[in-house]
Image (cartoon, helix red, strand yellow):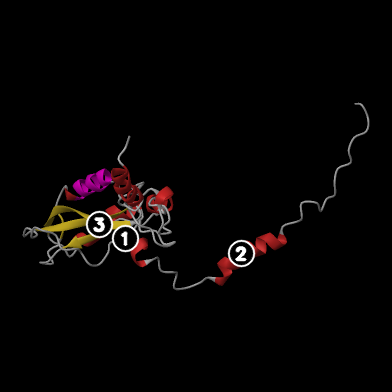
Amino acid sequence: MINKSILASLVPALLLGGCVGTENRGLESVHQPVVSRTDYALDLGVAGGALASGETERLAGWVETMRLGYGDRVTIDDPAAEGFRARDDVSAVISRYGLLLSADAPVTPAPVTPGSIRVVVSRMRATVPGCPDWSRDSTNDFEANTSSNYGCATNRNLAAMIANPADLVRGAPGTETTDAALSYKAIDTYRKKAPTGAAGLAAAGTGGK
């Protein structure tokens, strides 16, 4: 037979067992997307202010390997201003991927070697740390917490689907100008479209042919 004093001491421990784990005290999940940035750098030789012979091909192969795409930010680090014409060469390569050169290059660990420029690709990634999270037993929760896993599915899907993770940090700006003619084109097409029943309904055949 179990001693009553031992059983009495176990009851608080069992109750507290449901109170451990992640607390979600409201409808705003504690599991939020976290955006991290990684910088990839390639040093290219310059000659006469432009990219040296063979460097354009090396750059093209590098960005192909990087699978450059939307959301990537490409900059040039040229502290000595030696590649004053190389910017056009780099721009021509990355334009094949629908990207434009950005103005400010991030700080990289090593200095740029004289006679070269550094092309930096900054890539962001969004993740939701700690998910899935089943650390809290909701069946013994007396503090009105939502599930410890609350928000994991929604925010992980958001982090996986967003094209540019930087938009999770500062949002996406709207267009500065609006073309009214372009907006009206779809509406005008809809209005001029003949109704589907304008020609009437075909009579149903009654013969056995």
Relative to 170, 74 lies left or right: left
Q: Earlier in the sequence, mark 3 or mark 2?
A: 3
Q: Is residue 62 magenta?
A: yes
- Which image quarter: residue 79? bottom left
Tell me the mark number nearer the camera, choosing from 3 and 2.
3
Say which of 58 and 47 sits in front: 58
Does residue 147 sit above or below 207 in this rendering?
below
Decide: few, some or many residues near mark 3? Use Cα within 10 Å; few <14, some 14-19, many ≥20. few
Per the image, label 1 sits on a secondary structure element best described as loop
Give how far across and how far down residue 134 sits, in percent. 36, 46
Per the image, label 3 sits on a secondary structure element best described as strand
Relative to 73, 83 lies left or right: left
Say which of 167 and 209 sits in front: 167
Q: Amino acid at mark 3?
A: Arg
Q: Amino acid at mark 1?
A: Leu
Q: Which residue is mark 3?
A: 37
Tell me the distance, in whole angstroms, between the alpha carbons under discs 1 and 2: 29 Å
Say which of 144 and 8 sits in front: 8
Q: Earlier in the sequence, mark 1 or mark 2?
A: 1
Q: Which residue is mark 1?
A: 100
- Furthest residue to the bottom? 177
Give how far across and how far down residue 36 sits, in percent. 26, 56
- Furthest residue to the right? 207
Decide: marks 3, 1 in contact (CB < 8 A)? no
Please report the bounds of the magenta region as a residue range: 56-66
Q: Earlier in the sequence, mark 3 or mark 1?
A: 3
- Which image quarter: residue 86? bottom left
Which of the labelled discs sits on residue 185, or is there none?
A: 2
